[in-house]
Image: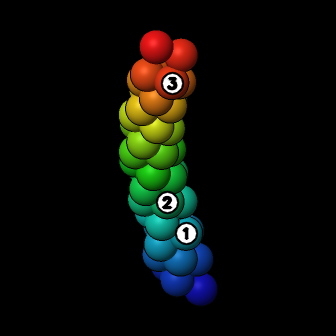
Amino acid sequence: MRKVFVFNKGLVVKPKKCTQAFLKSIIKSLRKASGNFLKIKNNVSIANIQ
């Protein structure tokens, strides 16, 4: 019983770490994409003003 519990605990902890890393990478890519989008938006508005 105890061995199974420890084994399950190990399985529960690992996916949590994986999902955290996965979410971090998604957030990073989203920030990059939104940053590029803002740059493009600014360039377009500047072009429209000129």
Task: Answer with mark 1 or mark 2, whichever residue precedes in sequence.
Answer: 1
- Which secondary structure lies at badge 3? helix
Q: Are marks 2 and 3 in contact (CB under 8 Å)?
A: no
Image x and y of residue 16, in percent: 53, 59
The residue where tag 2 is placed is: 19
Disc 2/disc 3 C-alpha distance (Å): 43 Å
- Count of picture labels: 3
Let me know if residue 27 appears in the view: yes
Task: Answer with mark 2 or mark 3, whichever residue precedes in sequence.
Answer: 2
17 vs 8: above or below: above
Mark 2, other Cα within 10 Å: few <14 / some 14–19 / many ≥20: few
Residue reaching furthest to the front: 50
Task: Answer with mark 3 or mark 1, whichever residue precedes in sequence.
Answer: 1
Question: Which mark lies nearer to you, 1 or 2?
Answer: 2
30 vs 10: above or below: above
Front residue of 35 and 23: 35
Disc 3/disc 1 C-alpha distance (Å): 54 Å
Question: Which mark lies nearer to you, 2 or 3?
Answer: 3
- Which secondary structure lies at badge 1? helix
The residue where tag 3 is placed is: 48
- Which secondary structure lies at badge 2? helix
| Picture residue at 47% right of the left edge, 72% below the top | 11
Image x and y of residue 4, in percent: 52, 83
Amino acid carrying mark 3 in the image: Asn
Front residue of 33 and 22: 33
Q: Which mark is residue 12?
A: 1
Front residue of 17 and 50: 50
Amino acid carrying mark 1 in the image: Val
Image x and y of residue 45, in percent: 53, 24
| Picture residue at 42% right of the left edge, 42% below the top | 33
Let me know if residue 31 appears in the view: no
